[in-house]
Image (spheres, grey):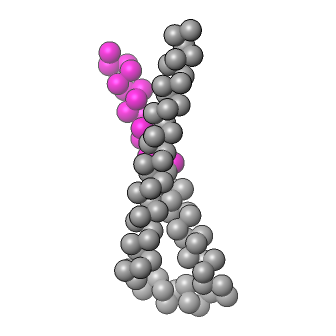
Amino acid sequence: MKQGKAKSELFSGLLTHLLMGACLGLVCAIVVLFADLAHLRDFFDNKPDPGVAELRFALNMTLAFAFSAALTGFIFMQMEKNKS
């Protein structure tokens, strides 16, 4: 039964890191879009549907941050498990 609890803790920890990364990525994407850093508004205005292009940018950034945070969290959890 101990193995089931360990898997549950791993899943819970990974989910937490994934959600934290997703929130951070979404906030970062919103800041980049609204602050018009690197003149992205001009870039998106040249697209056929700028709203969809901005949404895709925000979702890609969110997913990149989420998966990176989950991977980093997994590595840290494994290092902590091996340490004890």
Q: Which residue is pictured at 42% across the width and 26% down the height?
A: 78
* Most foreground residue, 71 or 30: 30
Q: Residue at x 67, y 88 (%)?
A: 48
Decide: is 48 above or below 81: below
Q: Residue furthest left?
A: 83
Highlighted range, magenta: 67-84
Asked if residue 32 lies in the magenta stretch, the reply is: no
Q: Residue at x 50, y 19 (%)?
A: 6
Residue most extreme to the top: 1
Residue 58 can be seen, yes or no? yes
Name the residue at 32% across, 19% down.
83
x and y, in percent, of residue 35 in the image? 37, 80
Chief SS of the magenta region: helix
Q: Looking at the figure, which quarter contains the N terminus? A: top right
Q: Is residue 76 left or right of residue 3?
A: left
Residue 70 visible? The answer is no
